[in-house]
Amino acid sequence: MKQKRFSHAIVRKPCRNMVNGLTTANMGKPDYALACEQHQNYIEALKTCGLKVDILEADEDYPDSTFIEDVALLTPHCTVITIPGVPSRKGEVDGVIKTIEKYYDNIEFIQEPATIEPGDIMMVGDHYYIGLSERTNLNGAEQMISALKKYGLNGSVVHFEKVLHLKTGLAYLENNNLAVCGEFIDHSEF
């Protein structure tokens, strides 16, 4: 199987307000200084892999904005701008569109009342598994599948109950290797 080659990454620096971000973990408040150090190490790791890294400045208006994945699905053929499932995160979308436009001519937009976050989307080749969660509704999944089909891609809906996002419980490692835990161990879809 031909290996995918990534050339760019888009990241957003953590903001000081991240200590007020959303969480389902019972781990206390984040340590801002440690988060900045870890984020810088992440950027350096991406660069070590040969990627050009676009670094967006921290956005104090959105505590969770460093989790930039949740506002757009980037595919080899198009990007789909999403609508985060938590109202307090919806404004994050505007802050990434200009950067995405540097790399993509084909940009689709999810429309309300849909909500969808790419933490609930796992790419396996040209197929995208879309998990229904508190953050991603059926309307969002259906709109995403429709957008993907325009570019010869396809998708399917996955039901789960015990994790925040689909990719909290599994990860595709390429070459037909899937890391799973919890409820996904015996899931019929995988």
Image (tube, rainbow, N blue to C red):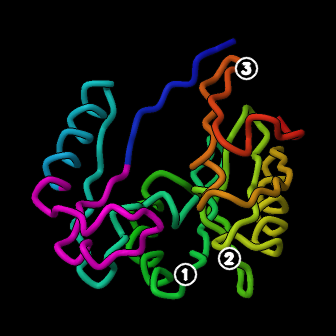
Which is closer to the viewer, label 1 or label 2? 1
Circle 2 Cα neighbour tier, 10 Å, few/some/many (<14 / 14–19 / ≥20): many
Badge number at residue 86: 1
Circle 3 Cα neighbour tier, 10 Å, few/some/many (<14 / 14–19 / ≥20): few
Say what secondary structure mark 2 lies in.
loop
Q: First in sequence, mark 1 or 2: give its number.
A: 1
The residue to which callout 3 is attached is 176
Specify the quadrant that holds the N terminus. Answer: top right
Q: First in sequence, mark 3 or 2: give its number.
A: 2
Callout 1 amino acid: Val
Is residue 19 found inside the magenta-colored segment of the image?
Answer: yes
Is residue 111 found inside the magenta-colored segment of the image?
Answer: no
The residue to which callout 2 is attached is 115
Choose top left, top right, bottom left or bottom right for residue 137: bottom right
| Residue situated in front as seen by the camera: 50 or 134 | 134
Specify the quadrant that holds the C terminus. Answer: top right
Q: Is residue 146 left or right of residue 109?
A: right
Callout 3 amino acid: Asn
Distance in Å between CA atoms under marks 1 and 3: 33 Å
Say what secondary structure mark 3 lies in.
loop
Q: Position of residue 5 (x, y in %)?
A: 50, 25
Above/below status of 79 relative to 141: above
| Residue situated in front as seen by the camera: 82 or 41 | 41
